[in-house]
Amino acid sequence: MPTRLRPKGPLAAAAILVGDPGRSLLLAQELLEEPKMSNHARGLWGYSGRAASGEELTIQATGMGGPSAALVLADLAKLGVRRAVRVGTCAGLDARARLGELLLPVGAVAIGGSAASFGQDPGSVVTPDPALLEELRSELGSEARAVTVASLDTMPADPAEVPADVVAADMQTVAVLARGRELGIAVAGVLIAGEVGGEVLPDEDLEAAAIRAGKAAARTLSNPKVEG
């Protein structure tokens, strides 16, 4: 049985993962017909319902940082989740990303810390599930740029700490990709550049970007070509 989540009903095989509980509520209201709260234990709000495609979909908060996301993903695996898309935020490094830009991680570089507990040495690169990645790429088209990101345990990231080809940094992508692989869950992600050079994306713009990314994630997860 799961250790952290206490679902009130069955979860879908497909899930959108977000760090912020408020974003899980936002996407549930936008993407699900008559969403029902499936979890509120530990403040990890989760919702389940029927998406526009007619398929069942779960939207689950994972908390802050890689260790929290990895623990939640393990519980989701026990509850039947088999494919997931992370919709999260990241910080652009210098001028390598534009504020509010949607980024499609094709690789995530582990920068020490908790990455070792997911079997990743410093500097190793974790890649998303190929089928999910390609479907996300197709759904987002010119709205998102395929990039390499880095994951750290603490933010903000120092551009000098990461390889030159890394565009942005966050706290969860390495964890969800690596842990998903271990658990047999197909995982990919789309990130919003919520901070660049000390400038922060306004809340209304962040919500609009999250909805765009969430809709693409929902369509991707409902595509029979990526069903596990």
Image: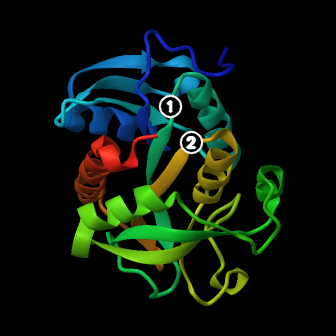
Viewed as shown, does residue 183 lie left or right of 40?
right
Q: In the rendered image, is residue 1 in sight?
A: yes
Looking at the image, the residue that sits furthest to the front is 225
Residue 112 in percent (x, y) is at 80, 65
Q: Quadrant of residue 126?
A: bottom right
Q: Which residue is pictured at 52% across the width and 28% down the height?
A: 44
148 is higher (above) or lower (below) than 130: below
Q: In the rendered image, is residue 199 in sight?
A: no
Which numbered circle lies on residue 81? 1
How packed mark 2 is, by other alpha carbons closer than 10 Å (few <14, some 14-19, many 20 or more), is: many
Q: Which residue is at the front of the view, 127 or 199? A: 127
Residue 196 in percent (x, y) is at 44, 76
Viewed as shown, does residue 222 lie left or right of 129?
left
Viewed as shown, does residue 225 lie left or right of 165?
left
How packed mark 1 is, by other alpha carbons closer than 10 Å (few <14, some 14-19, many 20 or more), is: many
Three-letter code, disc 2? Ile
Q: Quadrant of residue 208?
A: bottom left
Q: Quadrant of the N terminus?
A: top right
Three-letter code, disc 1? Val
Q: Which residue is at the front of the view, 76 or 37? A: 76
Residue under circle 2?
Answer: 185
Residue 16 in percent (x, y) is at 41, 41
Q: Contact (CB < 8 A) between labels 1 and 2?
A: yes
188 is higher (above) or lower (below) than 3: below
Residue 218 in percent (x, y) is at 29, 44
Describe the element under mark 2 as helix, strand or loop: loop
Gap in angstroms between the C-alphas marked 1 and 2: 7 Å
Q: Earlier in the sequence, mark 1 or mark 2?
A: 1
Q: Which residue is pictured at 56% across the width and 72% down the height?
A: 149
Q: Which residue is pictured at 35% across the width and 23% down the height?
A: 48
Number of callouts:
2
